[in-house]
Structure formats: C-alpha cells, structure tokens
Image (cartoon, coloured by chain):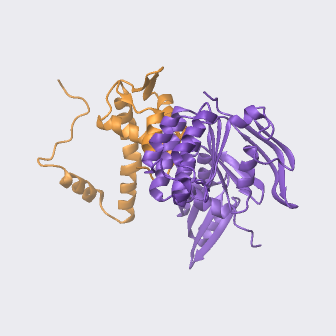
Chain colours: A purple, B orange
Amino acid sequence: MNTPATVTVTGATRDFHGSPALRGVDLVLPPGRITGLLGRNGAGKSTLLSLLAGRRRPTSGTIRVDDGDPFTDAATIQRICLVGDGGGDSDTSRVGARIDLLTTLRPSFDPDLAHRLLADFDIAERTRIKSLSRGQRAAVAVTLGLASRCALTLFDESHLGMDAHNRYVFYDALLADYVAHPRTIVVSTHHVDELARVLEDVVVLDVGRVLLHEPRDEVVARGAVVTGPARAVSGLVAGTRTLRTRRLGNTTEAVVYGDGTADVRQRAPAAGVDVTPIGLQDLFVQLTMKEHA
Amino acid sequence: MFDDDRPIYLQIADRIRTDILSGDLGPDDRVMSTNEIAQEFRINPATAAKGINLLVDDGILYKRRGVGMFVHDDARAVLRRRRREAFFSERVDPVVAEARLLDVPLDDVIARIRSTLPDPAPTPEPTSSPS
C-alpha cells in the first residue's frame, strides 16, 4: 500500500506566454490530510495542480513529492493521480475498458471499488465515454481517481459538472475510502460550503500567490460577522482586520478576520453587539475580493 | 445535524455528553469511532477525533487500544454535577436578571415555575434523605 505523500513546493513560478500564472508559491502539504484549494478563476489552482502532478514543469522553483521530482521521476509519477472533470468528448472507449486498463497499469488500483462506485453513480460500464453527460464523465473520472488509491490524489474541480446528488455520492466515497486508505488529497472546488467540513486544511490562492494556508477550523474561527449599533461596532472592531462594512440606518455589519476575533466575540455581549460565524465560502469571497481603494 | 454557530468538534463532544446524560450511552458502552462519525456526518476524521479527544482528556471517555472509545463509569455523575452548576449560572441567573429589568416580582417567577410542575406539586426535597 502507498504511504501518504508529502508535497513541498519551493519558490515555484509558472509563466504562460510571458504572463505569470503562479508568482512564487511556497507550500508544504503534510502527509495524509485533505486540503481544499480555493481561489477565484485564474488564481492559479489548475496550474499549481498540474505542477504537483508533473504534467508541467515550473518556470522557476522546485516541486517535490516526497523526495522525487514529479516531472522527471517515474517512480514518483506512479504515486500521483490528477483527476480533471472527465473531458472525453470524442472518447469512444467504454467505461469498463478504462477500469480494465487501469487495473493492469496501476498496481494500487482497486477494480472492486470502481465497480461499486459506478453503480452508486448509476453508470453502466458498457456505455461509451463520449455518450455520457458532462456530469457522468466527471463521475467516471472521480471513480477512477479514487480507485487508483494514489499516495497523492489531486481533484481539479472534478465534481463541478455533477448534480447535487452525485456530488454527495462523491464526498461520501472520498471520506470512506480516505478513512480506509489514508492518502494526501487536494481538492480544488467552487462548492466551498458543501465541502468545507470534509477538509482539514485550506489553501487560498490569489493572483498566483498563496494568500493563506491553515487548518479549516482556525480559518473559520478567525472570521465573524459583527452586527449592532454603528458606534458600538466600530469601537469593538477597531484593531481587528475588517474585510467589509455595511450600514443600514444606524446599524452596522462588519466582517472581521484576524486573531482579534476571539476578543471581539468575548466583549460583544457587554457592548450590545451580535457576533455570528461566517461560512468558509463567504469568508473566501471577502478575502479574495479586489481592493476598491 | 450540526449548525455553523460553533466548531463542529465541540458539537460532536456535546452530542456524546447529551447521550451519556440521557442514558443512551451507559458505563462501558462503546462510542462511535472517529471514522464512523466522519462517514456518518460527512466530516473530516481529524475533526471527529478532536471532539472525541476532548472527552478523553476530560475523563469522560477512555480508550482501549485497537478496540475503541468507551464511557467511563462515573461519566454521567460528573456531567450531571457540571451541568447543574451551569444550569444556575447560565439559565437561572439570566431569567432573574431579565425579571429585574422588567420589574417582575421574583415570587411571580417562582409561582410560574411551580405552576408548570406536574400535579401534585412536589415539596422541596431535602439534599440528603433521612433514612
């Protein structure tokens, strides 16, 4: 069995036709965790994942999966699985044939899990890939990705095209198989709130840089919505990073993010101010919003 | 199952505490494992482990290697004692404070509480029985 991989990214940049997609990324992913990779369109998520999977080479800097270079080292490449959204518009092969192929190619591949998952997704194995819907192709892709049981498994917005039911089938299968066969997993997603509780760590990419990399619990604890009389709120949040302020009459709502949030929470009742949690999705949107000033 | 108001691991610990208090989990009963909780409630196993470990550190649960987590003999008594203390500070005191604010006589509050008790109203019980 594959032991979970450690990922080390040092000073990685990547340019496309002279314009930078990654602008210097330093990142260490400890083995055996599920990390959520969040970022707006064009933030560099897919680029980073393709570097981790050895599909591309960084323009500068290094990528290591355990001690190996995923771009050049064959043994390292065997330990990595990058799952996209299925693609395959012109793929005439049948789903079942893909399972047979991977069973031969990858020693860690579990065909039983693949058969079981496809049944959960309601996909017949004799169907040709090209005649599946977009969401069904995505289901096939995550099935093959999970059943590959790679030490480093990367999902690049794989479940984007799936309907809600199938996304939950995916989350359940991901957790069940991760628990039984621990590995290092990175999931990039726009369905942040759906996946939030499944994540242990969160990486937020913003314009090609790592904006934050922390345990999900801590990110969520650091954020809060503070609502109350304008004067009381502004006094309370002074000194804590405020991401957004809205006013309605004499009531102010401020979104705060920082180490001071715990203190704000404690002093709020005495100040007659409400403090409520903010979801990961909302927090992420506020953190990556373009500065207007 | 869980709300977003508090960290999930605290809510997991609370659910287990409530099950122990209600008797759904008795002494030496096995508690759901971290992995079972993770799959049942679709949460990260590390989050589930954090909730369970909170109760282990607290002496409510104990670990048997390779078997699982179990409820301590005196867990229910300990939790009851603590919740009773919290009952007065967190539930009764705010009621009294609100009553003061609204000028409601405390006798009215007490009468109201008595009136909700099943008939016949029990007399205040002594802290230790004479026998």
Q: Residue furthest front?
A: A92
Q: Where in the figure is residue A205, as x and y percent of width and height?
A: 72, 55
The structure residue drawn at horizontal position 47% and vertical position 53%, both measured from the top left corner, is: A166
Q: Disc count in the image?
A: 0
* Left or right of A199, for residue B62: left
Q: Where in the figure is residue A125, as x and y percent of width and height?
A: 47, 47
* Left or right of A207, for residue A98: left
Q: Where in the figure is residue A147, as x and y percent of width and height?
A: 55, 39
The structure residue drawn at horizontal position 65% and vertical position 65%, both measured from the top left corner, is: A235
The structure residue drawn at horizontal position 82% and vertical position 47%, both measured from the top left corner, is: A57
Q: Which residue lies furthest to the bottom in this view?
A: A249
Residue B45, visible in the rendered structure: yes
Q: Where in the figure is residue A99, as x and y percent of width and height?
A: 55, 41
Out of B47 and A132, give the one closest to the viewer: A132
In which quadrant is the N terminus of chain A drawn? top right
In which quadrant is the C terminus of chain A drawn? bottom right
Q: Which corner quadrant of the image does residue A183 belong to?
A: top right
Q: Which corner quadrant of the image does residue A68 belong to?
A: top right
Residue A277, visible in the rendered structure: no
- Reply above or below: A293 against A134: below
Q: Which residue lies furthest to the top in this view?
A: B65
Out of A161 and B75, give the one closest to the viewer: A161
